[in-house]
């Protein structure tokens, strides 16, 4: 089979791809193909000329795929942001699955050819809308359907149905990808457009999620821009890397359904295939937030459970875990850090209540150091946000909102680990979808568990003699001191590290 078949390439093919951007610098390119008129008497070189012409540098092509599930409130803004890009994708496929709202009708109003002239260069894109109807593989099935539609292109841009892009995001992603062909996938910097959400609870949760995204982005940027997760919100994939993944892992398509986090699984596989997974230094995208506790719980538990499942596969995985995979180092750090946060906060709360109950608590100003360092760390991160506002700075400086959001995140963490260890057969995709529709009460379980622990601890405490109570306090406080000092030192290390000009 030859190279001319769309979507198929030789493993030895190393064609140079050029970005369609005036910002691109000059590349060291091979000599231009000789003119046929100069060589018309030399028949023996005709095959070489054809081969060189086939591998001549050319502009890269990008296919954008947008998996959609009940996105009637956001799909129009997503498509408008794509059509406003300084580098339009060559084609846009809106792939709708399991939807029972007006997403198809709204998306079809954008169907057809769109042309835009930017700095004298004309860009043309075609928007196609595909309604898959009932699709048991849900988002994974939509992504793979989009892959098969895009096999003749060099890059696939995956965008969620609730994610809008900064106007130069596609151009910046393409520039970085073509500049380094070793990159198999490139993620945008994620944030949330806070201006669209009203209400005290929504604004609080949006502020918390913005801080959470900012911390995650900065950690990845400062680790050589190595991205552990090529999030489906907005990532550019090298089609050659996806094909390599399919060959190495005997898959029919790049994304697999045996993981709660299909993007994390694919990121590991791309890394295993010899490609790097990176976060862009400048391309930005604005994702849809969760604006109530029920929906946030469904999303975060799915994310946390999926990460745990990559360490040691649970009931859904069919491949061995990869606890030492380099892409999972940040995941390990997140889990260990969250375990320390739970232990220190719960330990302090229990010891405080116990000490107060027997009038044995003595305030020491040294306990003000950890929260002071935490406030400074949160403020520094807020100042590193590209679109920071007064609400971001207040969220960090007041400490109470950040602390309350941390307790919410700890509940998600405990719920995910409890589900994993119990090996309950639960579809977290469906759970998140139901939560976003206002169904389910799983989000209150962490609070119930906390109250049960506190109640049980108080009852057990009251059953002890004064001597035993004193012994518990004399042992518990020093242990808490050591753990808190370790956490504070680590926060100080993050506080003084250079951000190297990165903005999140």
Image: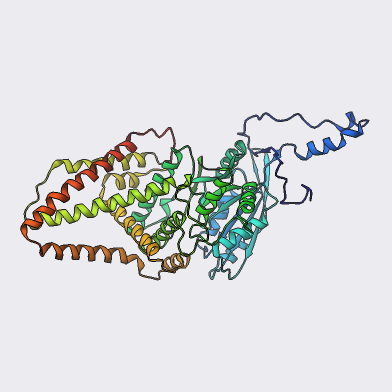
Query: Which of the colour schemes (rainbow, by chain, secondary structure, one colour) is used?
Result: rainbow
Q: Is residue 165 above or below residue 68?
A: above
Question: Residue 228, can we see it?
Answer: yes
Please indicate whether residue 272 sits to the left or right of residue 304 in the image.
right
Q: Nearer the viewer, residue 41 or 291?
A: 41
How many labels, in total? 0
Please indicate whether residue 264 sits to the left or right of residue 119 in the image.
left
Residue under the image location 73 percent in, 30 percent down: 30
> Residue 354 placed where, x, y %?
13, 57
Q: Residue furthest front?
A: 320
Please indicate whether residue 9 sits to the left or right of residue 343 in the image.
right
> Residue 472 placed where, x, y %?
13, 54
Q: Is residue 292 above or below residue 394?
A: below
Q: Nearer the viewer, residue 330 or 293?
A: 330
Instruction: Say which quarter of the image contains residue 222.
Output: top left
Residue under the image location 70 percent in, 30 percent down: 29
Question: Residue 110, can we see it?
Answer: no
Q: Nearer the viewer, residue 302 or 76?
A: 302
> Residue 423 placed where, x, y %?
41, 66
Residue under the image location 40 percent in, 41 percent down: 385
Q: Quadrant of the C terminus?
A: top left
> Residue 180 placed where, x, y %?
60, 37
Q: Is residue 469 above or below residue 41?
A: below
Instruction: Say which quarter of the image contains residue 12.
Output: top right
Q: Residue furthest right?
A: 41
């Amino acid at each position: 089979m030859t190279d001319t078949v769309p979507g198929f390439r030789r493993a030895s093919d190393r064609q140079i791809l050029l970005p369609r951007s005036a910002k691109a610098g000059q590349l060291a390119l091979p000599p231009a193909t000789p003119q046929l008129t100069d060589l018309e008497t030399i028949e023996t070189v005709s095959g070489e000329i054809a081969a060189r012409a086939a591998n001549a540098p050319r502009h890269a092509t990008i296919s954008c795929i947008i998996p959609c599930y009940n996105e009637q409130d956001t799909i129009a803004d997503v498509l408008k942001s794509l059509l406003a890009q300084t580098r339009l994708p060559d084609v846009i496929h809106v792939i709708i699955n399991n939807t029972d709202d007006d997403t198809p009708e709204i998306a079809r109003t954008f169907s057809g050819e769109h042309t835009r002239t930017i700095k004298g260069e004309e860009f043309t894109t075609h928007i196609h809308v595909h309604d898959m109807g009932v699709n048991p593989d849900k988002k994974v099935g939509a992504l793979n359907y989009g892959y098969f539609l895009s096999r003749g292109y060099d890059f696939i841009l995956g965008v969620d149905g609730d994610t809008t892009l900064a106007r130069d995001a596609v151009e910046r992603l393409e520039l970085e990808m073509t500049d380094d062909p070793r990159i198999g996938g490139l993620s945008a910097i994620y944030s949330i457009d806070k201006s669209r959400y009203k209400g005290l609870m929504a604004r609080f949760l949006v502020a918390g999620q913005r801080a959470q995204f900012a911390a995650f982005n900065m950690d990845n940027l400062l680790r050589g821009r190595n991205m552990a997760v090529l999030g489906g919100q907005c990532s550019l994939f090298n089609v050659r890397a996806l094909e390599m993944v399919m060959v190495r892992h005997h898959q029919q398509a790049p994304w697999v359904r045996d993981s709660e986090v299909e993007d994390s699984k694919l990121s590991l596989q791309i890394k295993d295939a010899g490609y790097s997974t990176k976060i862009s230094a400048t391309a930005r995208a604005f994702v849809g937030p969760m604006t109530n506790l029920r929906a946030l719980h469904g999303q975060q538990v799915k994310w946390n459970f999926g990460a745990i499942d990559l360490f040691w596969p649970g009931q859904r995985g069919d491949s061995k875990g990869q606890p030492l995979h380099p892409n999972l180092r940040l995941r390990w750090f997140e889990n260990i850090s969250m375990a320390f946060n739970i232990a220190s906060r719960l330990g302090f709360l229990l010891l405080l209540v116990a000490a107060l109950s027997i009038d044995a608590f003595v305030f020491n100003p040294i306990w003000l150091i950890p929260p002071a360092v935490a406030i400074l760390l949160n403020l520094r991160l807020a100042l590193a946000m590209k679109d920071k506002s007064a609400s971001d700075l207040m969220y960090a400086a007041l400490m109470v909102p950040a602390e309350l959001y941390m307790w919410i995140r700890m509940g998600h963490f405990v719920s995910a680990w409890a589900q994993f260890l119990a090996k309950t057969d639960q579809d977290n995709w469906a759970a998140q979808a139901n939560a976003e529709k206002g169904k389910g009460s799983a989000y209150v379980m962490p609070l119930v568990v906390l109250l049960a622990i506190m109640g049980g601890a108080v009852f057990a405490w009251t059953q002890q003699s004064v001597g035993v109570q004193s012994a518990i306090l004399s042992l518990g406080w020093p242990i808490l001191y050591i753990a808190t000092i370790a956490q504070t030192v680590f926060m100080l290390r993050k506080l003084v590290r250079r951000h190297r000009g990165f903005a999140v």
